[in-house]
Amino acid sequence: MLHCDQLTLRQGRRTLLQPLTWQVRAGECWWIAGRNGCGKSTLLATLAALRRADGGHIRLCGQPLPQLTPRQRAQRLAMLPQASHDAFDYAVQDAVAAARFAWPDAGDNPQRVAAALDAFDLGRLAARPLQALSGGERQRVALASVMAQDAPLILLDEPSNSLDLAHQAALQQQIGRWCAQGKAVLLVSHDLQLAPACASHALLLDKYGQHRQYPLAELNAEHLAAVLGYPLTRLHHAGHPCFLPGHPS
Amino acid sequence: MSHSLTLDRPLRGALRLPTLPLLTLLALLSGGSLLLACSSGSIALGAGELWLAASGHGSQLADTLLSLRLERALTAWVTGASLALAGVLMQSLLRNPLADPYVMGVSGGASVGALLALWLGLALWQVDSAAVAGALTLSALLFLLARRDFARSSGTVLLLLTGVLLSAACGALISLLLTIAPDAQLRGMVFWLVGDIAGTPLRPWPWLALLPAALLAWWQAPAINLLALHGDHALTLGVPVAMLRRLLLVLAAVLTASAVSQGGSIGFIGLMVPHACRLLCGPDLRRLIPAAVLSGAALLVLADTLARTVVAPMQLPVGVLTALLGVPVLFWQLQRTRRRLA
């Protein structure tokens, strides 16, 4: 679905990402982990064509990323940005419906919008203006928009931000459903419970631009601790791996 | 998430009519404003007289009055509509409900051109052409300086700052021209700057600019909605962001140039009308664009009618009136926003 070949990212003279060769297949969920400023969001922005790669090639669904038109890209890739600022007071349902822009001729647009609103528990808020929402509610609107866009590759930057516990659990289930449907998810997250519970693989980025790829089953506490710069313990909880800060006593 | 300071939040139960009745209402209002403009003045014309004059059977006086007033009212109509539409487009481009068509300095360029022509003592049509040339030169300069910013993330901030700087440069040139102008020309120059449509003949090309611009903007409204909602990230939803930003800037510049050449810098229409329309029909541009065009037109026709009747036989420049009307309205809005933030 997504194929990076020797992908390199720089910011000024600093190398954010040493040449990365990486393959993301349908049904996989990749957890992208690393410390602040190590280039996780820059990587997502590059994959979404919001910025240019500083070296190497990206292929999305078999085609080189720069050759796709914005609409073709939007039909293949959806992205949840980290923060959004609302200048205008659109209603929740209008904001989610607008995410169907790439599919103007689809006959099932209203149903998809309703399903997305439902999946993130927004039915009750559908007519509310965006600026009347709390942070967590606004985040759910952004997630519902991503879902309504219905792309096979989904990029999520800190999706659990501001979500309460119940909605975090719902998000985790939704990511599972996406993968089961054959979509692929890239998940940038600092959440040491949610991310390992969703992910099938992990891509660790360190602050020197080095990177490592692991199937999640092989990701141990030492690998992660080395990248995050803090001791960790790997546990198994509720059927999923998770990580806790600190050494086991 | 922080709540940004915006004036766009409707009160609970704000009037949100369905699209068709809303636009019909505004179209009627717009037409009604033309009728009112034709009937009022030093000699009032009743409905019967208007009808007779329009069908060619009226007295000669009524005929003359009607054609004079209608011509002026239509000029006000197209100018108001252009300013309101330019305001909507500029606000969507900059994602700021407080942006107005003049923020990029386009009117500054027009003013420099027009004042230069007045200073040189050129004919009226040359002054108009100089205003258009000034506006277009400034837009071209802005475009050139900011050509890379359209695709860049947070590029609109750079674009805005470039516009503000160019605006400041024009302000300095305007002051210079006013300082060195001979007394005989000073009055005309000041009148031009204030914004006035008295004596502007009815021309075809402002209509030729407004009509395609409005249709093009309305056709692109779903994409502009996404740009207003998501900024740079509209790209990931399928909007060709850089191209759309260029289009919006060009349309806003052409509309502003056309409006400024008609009536000088008439303030607050481009700010107040989109704002009021958002309260009335929400921020969706598929509704907002036609609504703003119709109500901007109506508002300027009414303001101009007021300007020539309120202290008759003296005529006020309409720009003074729109500012006197606009400032309290926006103050009231600001106060409401303050209460909400408190």
Image (cartoon, coloured by chain):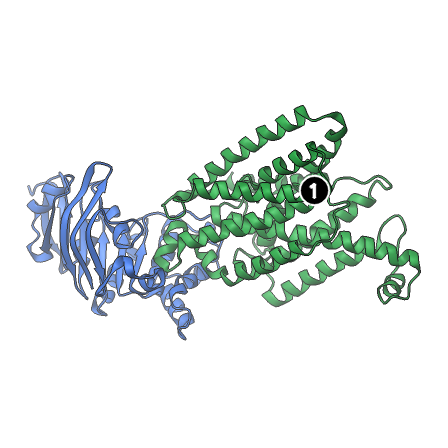
Chain colours: A blue, B green
Secondary structure found at label 1: helix
Q: Position of residue B126 (x, y in %)?
A: 68, 42
Residue A94 vs residue A8, the one in the foreground: A8
Residue type of the residue flagged with mark 1: Leu
The reply, left or right, for residue B120 in relation to residue B102 is right
Residue at (8%, 41%) from the top-left corner?
Answer: A247
Q: Position of residue A145 (x, y in %)?
A: 37, 60
For this orientation, the residue located farthest to the bottom is A107
The reply, left or right, for residue B213 in relation to residue A213 is right
Query: Dot 1 surroundings within 10 Å: few (below 14), some, or many (20 or more)?
Result: some
- Circle 1 chain: B
Residue B263 vs residue B127, the one in the foreground: B127
Q: Which residue is mark 1?
A: B325
- For the C terminus of chain A, give its image quadrant: top left
The image shows residue B169, relative to residue B230, as above or below, that is above
The reply, left or right, for residue A154 in relation to residue A33 is right
- Quarter of the image holding residue A196? bottom left
Evaluate whether residue A111 shows in this view: yes
Residue at (13%, 60%) from the top-left corner?
Answer: A239
For this orientation, the residue located farthest to the right is B59
Q: Position of residue B86 (x, y in %)?
A: 57, 50
- For the N terminus of chain A, give its image quadrant: bottom left
